[in-house]
Amino acid sequence: MSRRKQIYEGKAKVLFEGPEPGTIVQYFKDDATAFNNKKKGTITGKGVLNNRISEHLMIKLNDMGIPTHFIKRLNMREQLVKKVEIIPIEVVIRNIVAGSLAERLGLQEGDQLSRSIVEFFYKSDQLNDPMITEEHITAFDWASSQEMDEIVTMTLRINDFLSGLFFGAGIKLVDFKLEFGRIYSNEQVTIVLADEISPDSCRLWDLNTDEKLDKDRFRRDLGSTAEAYQEVARRLGVLPRNTNNFFDEKIN
Ligand code: UDP
């Protein structure tokens, strides 16, 4: 890890220069934060699990024609991804009322939405990721109208696909957050799905019991957070049966 040039350190990941131009290595940490950094902790093994879970989901999305930044997993905690210009927006899509939607509008957590809701937040820790509309995004040139059409279309497709995939694993996909980036090649701009998809960025509830299997366990001090992430990995079929050595570090 130390041989590589660090580009950026975020809350849950570190980015290093990749082996070839246009590539980046994403290192998944066990660190967890919530409430805009006010709550900090570690979830043992989280980085290893998120690396695997995100790899699995990105490969499936690539297979169904959603362009992503994912190239390949390198080892337990690292994956090689394409370097993108991140669009400074968090795209949240919701199927069931939870979290900030419940709080802001005084709704009952757990209520099924009659249609999925797409929301946008401006990525700024300093401003506490304020909610914005497409009007702000296009007025401030964070993305064009055409890019936003593409982003929303991709988000809805991703939601349909992942909802089905998680349902098959006995999990309700309540809501999740996506980030997108631009890749420039031959004077062409392609919008691709970036960042990660994991229990850090999704609300995942057990299909039968509504037990939370995601970062809300950490946010709300519910305990057994690492076990919940493991359960998601197991249900998706990405946790090997013999987990004795699964969390051993073997970084090349
Ligand atoms: N989310 C995220 N990063 C953020 C904010 C939200 O990954 O900075 C995810 C969160 O895990 C949930 C969804 O986006 O799956 C919707 O989050 P919400 O707006 O309800 O905010 P929160 O309750 O996390 O404050």
Image: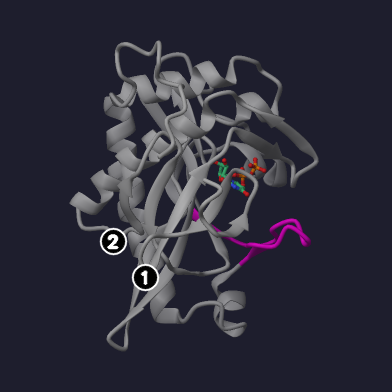
Residue nearest the viewer, comparing 164 with 2: 2
| Residue 209 appearing in the image | yes
Residue 67 - label: 2
**Mark 1: amino acid:** Ile
Q: Classify mark 1: residues with Cα within 10 Å, few (<14), some (14-19) or many (20+).
A: many
**Mark 2: amino acid:** Pro
Q: Quadrant of residue 99?
A: top right
| Residue 211 appearing in the image | no
Segment tinted magenta in the rendering? 118-132
Proximity of marks 1 and 2: CB atoms separated by less than 8 Å: yes
Residue extending farthest to the front is 3
Residue matched to label 1: 191
Residue nearest the viewer, comparing 88 with 209: 88
**Which residue is rendered at x = 28% and y = 34% of the image?**
165
**Which residue is rendered at x = 52% and y = 45% of the image?**
1
| In-image side of 180 versus 239 (left or right) | right
Q: Is residue 204 part of the magenta span, yes or no?
A: no
Q: Secondary structure at mark 2?
A: loop
Q: Secondary structure at mark 1?
A: strand
Ligand 1: which quarter?
Answer: top right
**Which residue is rendered at x = 28% and y = 61% of the image?**
67
Residue nearest the viewer, comparing 6 with 216: 6
